[in-house]
Structure formats: C-alpha cells, structure tokens
Image (tube, grey):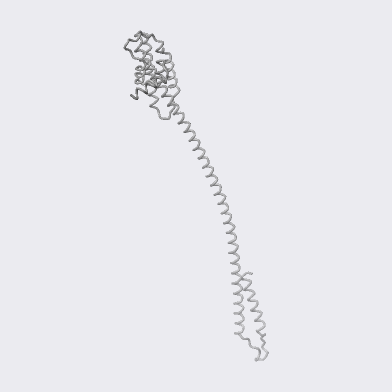
C-alpha cells in the first residue's frame, strides 16, 4: 500500500465523519438546531492521523527489515562462492608448488649421481696417468742402466736417444695435462700420444737382449743393483723384471736396506 492510498483513505474517513456530524442547514428551520462540536471532530481527526502514521511507520520498518535480510542473504551467498573459488585456486597453487618441488629433488639427485660418476672417472684417469708416468720412468731408468753395462756402439746410442726423446715428449704431454682443470678427463689425442710413447718404449730391446760385456771382478752384485735401482726411483716389480729376480726377493733386500 502506497502513501497516496493511505492519505486518500484518511480523507475519506474524515469526510464520512463530517457527513454524520454536520446537519444539513436550512434557512427555514429553528435556530435551536443541533450544533457541531469542533473540538470532537478535531480530536477524531488527530487520532486517525496518529493511527495511520503508526501504521505507515510499521510498514516502512517491515519493508526495510525485509530488504536488509534479503541483502544479507545475497551477500552471504556471494561470499561463500568467493571463498570456494579461493580455496580451489589455493589447492591448485599448492599442487603446482609440490610438483615443482618434486622436480627439483629429482634434478638434484640426478646431478649428485652425475657428479659421483664424474669424480670416479677423473680418479680413474688420474690413477692411469700415474701408472703411465711410472712405467715411462721405469723404462727411462732401465735404458740408463742398460747403457751403463752395454758396449758403446751406435745402435745403443740410437736406442737411447729414441727413448730419451720419447720420454721428453711424454713428460711434455703429462705437464700439459696437469695444467688442465681438476675434473677434465684426458683428451683422446693425448691418450693416443701416450699410447704411441708406450708402444715405442716396448719396442726398445730389453737389457737382457742387448749385448753385454763381462762385468769386472769389482762390479756390483744383485743386492747393490737392487738398491741402486731403488734409489733411482724404479718400482719393485720393474727391478725384479730387469734383474730376473722374484718380487719378494727384491722387496726383502729393500726392506733390509731401509731398516739398516
């Protein structure tokens, strides 16, 4: 019900009351007719106005309350929808973070495995390099030893020069490799050079095959030769092979010398 309708109803009520209270005037009737009480009419009108005003206020308050409740329900529904959307998005973000974390762990484990394999390869290469250097050193010492007991013919000098040249080339290659970074494996060309040096060294005739002159009466015995070769840096295996002795015998002589 609108405000205009309420006002029209109030006016209709007033006109109805006035139609009952106000007598019809006539010029020919007696002067002692019924007189209208203006105060009564005014009181009735004010009472009706107050009642209608109260009714209007109740209707307005009821309308406002209904609108507020409806608005609150709509806001609650919208808030719930937004909260659900945020929860779904947060779940997706957490899932992505977990997936990325698993990938990082996998890559870290793979790098650790690669690092271990790389370190093992470098260690093997370093060990192999030391063995090659030791073999070359043994060959050089063996050649020097052979030149000391063999006749000074041209063939011996040529072989000695060849061995010295091969050893110098190998040492240059070894120095160049040592200047590389710590974890860089041996390059194929350098490995081929070392193989070539070892092949040339193997082609050198052994001391036993070289013509030997008879040792003088005051020459070294086997023990002295073992000690001298040991001081020159030859390994026990190389000394035993050079003198045709057992490795245990060579080791025993060296241990006795070191203890004394």
Quadrant in the picture for residue 96: top right
Total marks shown come to: 0
**Quarter of the N terminus within the rendering:** bottom right
Classify 74 as above or below 13: above
Classify 155 as above or below 33: above
Using the image as rendered, state which of residue 246 and residue 57 is in the foreground. 246
Using the image as rendered, state which of residue 155 and residue 244 is in the foreground. 244
Q: Is residue 8 left or right of residue 238?
A: right
Residue for point 47% across, 33% down:
116
Q: Is residue 230 left or right of residue 16?
A: left
Q: Is residue 214 left or right of residue 86?
A: left
Classify 115 as above or below 199: below
* Outermost left residue: 218
- Percent coordinates x, y for residue 97 in the rendering: 52, 45
- Percent coordinates x, y for residue 37 in the rendering: 62, 86
Quadrant in the picture for residue 10: bottom right
**Quarter of the C terminus within the rendering:** top left
Using the image as rendered, state which of residue 91 and residue 160 is in the foreground. 160
Residue for point 39% across, 23% down:
174
- Percent coordinates x, y for residue 136 in the rendering: 40, 19
Using the image as rendered, state which of residue 116 and residue 2 is in the foreground. 116
Residue for point 67% across, 91% down:
30
- Percent coordinates x, y for residue 254 in the rendering: 37, 22
Classify 30 as above or below 20: below
């Amino acid at each position: 019900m609108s405000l205009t309708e309420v006002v029209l109803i109030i006016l209709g009520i007033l006109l109805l009351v006035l139609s009952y209270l106000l007598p019809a005037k006539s010029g020919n009737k007696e002067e002692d007719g019924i007189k209208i009480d203006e105060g009564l009419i005014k009181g009735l009108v004010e009472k009706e106005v107050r009642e209608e005003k109260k009714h209007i206020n109740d209707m307005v308050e009821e309308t406002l309350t209904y609108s507020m409740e409806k608005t609150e329900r709509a806001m609650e529904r919208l808030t719930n929808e937004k909260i659900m959307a945020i929860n779904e998005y947060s779940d997706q973000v957490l899932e992505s973070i977990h997936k990325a974390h698993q990938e990082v762990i996998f890559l870290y484990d793979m790098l650790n495995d690669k690092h271990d394999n790389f370190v093992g390869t470098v260690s093997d290469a370093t060990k192999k390099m030391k063995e090659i250097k030791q073999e070359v050193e043994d060959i050089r010492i063996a050649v020097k030893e052979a030149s000391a007991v063999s006749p000074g013919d041209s063939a011996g000098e040529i072989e000695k020069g060849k061995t010295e040249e091969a050893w110098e080339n190998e040492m240059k290659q070894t120095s160049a490799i040592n200047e590389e970074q710590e974890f860089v494996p041996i390059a194929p060309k350098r490995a081929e050079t070392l193989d070539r040096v070892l092949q040339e060294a193997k082609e050198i005739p052994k001391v036993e095959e070289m013509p030997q002159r008879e040792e003088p009466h005051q020459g070294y015995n086997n023990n002295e030769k073992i000690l001298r070769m040991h001081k020159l840096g030859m390994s026990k295996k190389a000394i035993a092979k050079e003198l045709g002795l057992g490795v245990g015998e060579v080791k025993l002589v060296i241990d006795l010398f070191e203890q004394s």
